[in-house]
Amino acid sequence: MEAVSELNEPVSGELVSVAHALSLPAESYGNDPDIEMAWAMRAMQHAEVYYKLISSVDPQFLKLTKVDDQIYSEFRKSFEKLKIDVLDPEELKSETAKEMWRPFCLKFEGLVEDFNYGTLLRLDCSKGYTEENTIFAPRIQFFAIEIARNREGYNTAVYNVQNKGEKGVGNRDKREKEACSGGKGKKEAGSEEKEKEADSREQVDNGAIDSEGEKENADKEGEKNQ
């Protein structure tokens, strides 16, 4: 996914040169740190969108491309024992590693759009896209590792942490709301009970007065009859 500028500013010659450079295949540059930084800036939006995705949807149900099954199958066939929860940069960047990865990547030329497009890849899948936890990789390498992380349950850690935090906030708000409403309810219930008690006392008092008055009148009527 390409980052889009929000401002319609004049494009300088330097930016045109950078744009042209970024349109070329990633392998054309070797390990030039300046070019990799330019690619990283372009890939940042993609990284942010992807991290939000695995934070909000259970990664095991995600489909990243139309050929996820083929990517995963070929990946595990070629890199059966590669540890993907925490990546070793040497397994991706060393000359020996590049020789192993090259034929795998080329299998998806034409199948995966922009298969060699520069992409940010997390080293430790339980953490986010921080400077120390990020490495630059071709897009197909990103897809291969992230599809495997999703299917093998490694990215679930990010989803669980994110949702646990949201549930914690939700439960806290719910408890606070219940506490407030509960306190109010108790107060109102107490007031109602006091009012009922007062009414009962008034009814009892009135009943007692009426009974005594009736008794007094009855006594008087008896005396008259005598």
Image (cartoon, rainbow, N blue to C red):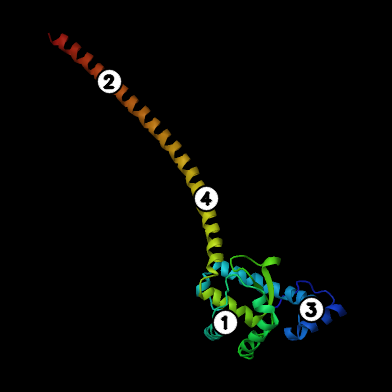
Residue receiving disc 3: 32
Q: Which amino acid lies under the numbered mark 3 shown in the image of this protein?
A: Asp
> Around disc 1, counting alpha carbons within 10 Å, would you say few (fewer than 14), some (14 to 19), or many (20 or more)?
few
Q: Which amino acid lies under the numbered mark 4 shown in the image of this protein?
A: Arg
Residue receiving disc 1: 79
Mark closest to the chain's N terminus, 1 or 3: 3
In this picture, is 145 found above or below 213?
A: below
In this picture, is 215 found above or below 1?
A: above
Q: Tell me where residue 66 sits by quadrant.
A: bottom right
Q: Quarter holding the N terminus?
A: bottom right
> Around disc 3, counting alpha carbons within 10 Å, would you say few (fewer than 14), some (14 to 19), or many (20 or more)?
few
Local secondary structure at mark 1: loop
Mark closest to the chain's N terminus, 3 or 4: 3
Badge number at residue 208: 2
Give percent across and percent down for residue 219: 18, 12
Q: In this image, 163 relative to 128: left or right?
A: left
Mark closest to the chain's N terminus, 3 or 2: 3
Q: Residue at x 54, y 74 (%)?
A: 150
Q: CA distance from mark 2 to mark 4?
A: 53 Å
Q: Are marks 3 and 2 in contact (CB under 8 Å)?
A: no
- Furthest residue in direction left, as rendered: 226
Mark closest to the chain's N terminus, 4 or 1: 1
Q: CA distance from mark 3 to mark 4?
A: 49 Å
Give the camera-side residue of 121 and 197: 121
Mark closest to the chain's N terminus, 2 or 1: 1
> Around disc 4, counting alpha carbons within 10 Å, would you say few (fewer than 14), some (14 to 19), or many (20 or more)?
few
Residue receiving disc 4: 172
Mark closest to the chain's N terminus, 2 or 4: 4
